Amino acid sequence: MPPMTELPVPRPSACPGLLRIVQALDGGICRVKLPGGVLAASQARSIAEAAQRFASGVLELTNRSNLQIRGVRAESEHDLIRALLAANLGPSVLDADDVRNLMLSPAAGLDPQQHMDTRPLADALLALLQNNSALHVLSAKFAIQLDGGESLCMLEHPHDLWLRALPGAPQLIFGLAGCPTDKPLGMVAAANAVQLVEAILLTFLECAGPEQSRMRQLLESIPADELVRRVQARLPFAISPVAVECQRQIPAAAPPIGIIAQRQAELAMVAASAPLGRISAEQLGAVAELAQRHADGSLRLTPWQGLLIPNVQIHEADNVLAALTQVGLLTNRAAPLPNLIACTGSAGCARGLADTKHDALVLAACLQQHDARPQVHLSGCSRSCAAAHVAPYTLLAVGESRYQLFERTENKTGFGQPLAPPMNIDEAGAWLAQHHATGRTHA
């Protein structure tokens, strides 16, 4: 690792990174970006140790399969960065930490329904993002999704660029500023995907103005077909039109929990959810030990703010699932808590109008009592940091322990249709319990 004096000064941004620790009410936040969401057990132990030594010991699993260390102490920032780099958790090119935003299915290479193992292409795309210095000026929020057709995937998170594998021949369709369920703009051979992505990113940077840091902003001034025409001018091969119907079905949005069969015979993934997206350093260390003892020593984080241990022998899967329960992770699909998302809230964020983590636990207890299991997102403000997609129900804080309830609908933007006047969390729980149980959706 180079000496600390040789580390680059990270550019200003509100987004935390490994080299840029952003302050919150509960201390600094350090975000560790994981290639494909994969974390070796040895790296997990290094994170756990660093979080205990230099921070609060509280870890967050993000909705793009990354990991955040919370409560970083100001006097320990450099020591934390040093420890993470020593564990090979940084970028291959230090200036490129911000642009390593590539999301895969947590079951890439393992999913029985996949059309393509996306991992080799993902490695090549990450190498492109890190090695081409012209791309380092991309926004820290600019993100790419690579969909291999897996059944275990999050398709509702919008990305600046998405690529999706088709069944049969190794071909990829692509789109801009959306999701793999959207209408594609073109198709290329999988072997040409890296060149395509490079051309799209360079064209974006060439065309985007100072206030256009995201693809959706650029498309407000340049039509998508015109942007594709400019991309085509950079390429030595033709972008093909998509002549056949290739609608992508959205899998069930419930977080993966339990034992999931792999395409590899006699192996399974064992998945659990982190309570409201948070685990302790001790819990991460315990999960790393399970992965080392019962599988291949790797973990995969999921965009549902959970994790899974891959490559577990089928005959050991029940024991691993029970051990995850003992560690304190959520393994009961029927419980309400795995269906709840909550941001940091007022306990850790100056923008938060309510203590969403606390209120989510109150809501879970109410829903448990009434045997109701709606999927609900509690957001402390309108930025919706904890959920990149719109949940079926959203409780948007409007004051301390007071929320506006919304239901996602096709004809409404934002969080959807408001369902009731602002209410406290107990009233919201009673409303959701009654209406979810009866199947009614409006007051």
Image (cartoon, rainbow, N blue to C red):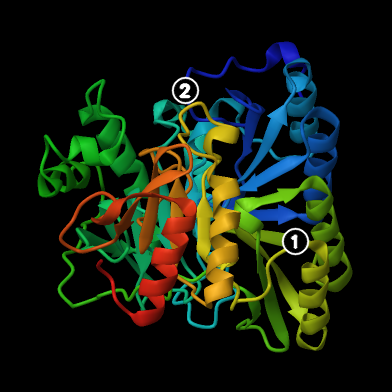
Q: Quadrant of residue 431?
A: bottom left
Relative vertical location of residue 341 with respect to residue 353 in this rendering, above or below: below
Q: Determine the residue positioned at 76% across, 86% down.
A: 314
Badge 1 amino acid: Ser
Q: Nearer the viewer, residue 262 or 323?
A: 323
Q: Is residue 56 left or right of residue 377?
A: right
Mark 1 neighbour density, 10 Å: few (under 14) some (14–19) many (20 or more) = many
Q: Is residue 370 visible?
A: yes
Callout 1–callout 2 Cβ contact below 8 Å: no
Residue at horizontal 20 percent and vertical 30 percent from the top = 207
- Judge by depth and name the residue closer to the eye, 395 or 89: 395
Q: Which mark is residue 13?
A: 2
On the image, numbered disc 1 is attached to which residue?
298
Left/right placement of residue 298 relative to residue 111 reads right
309 to the left or right of 128: right
Check the image and report above or below for 261 versus 284: below
Q: Nearer the viewer, mark 1 or mark 2?
A: 2
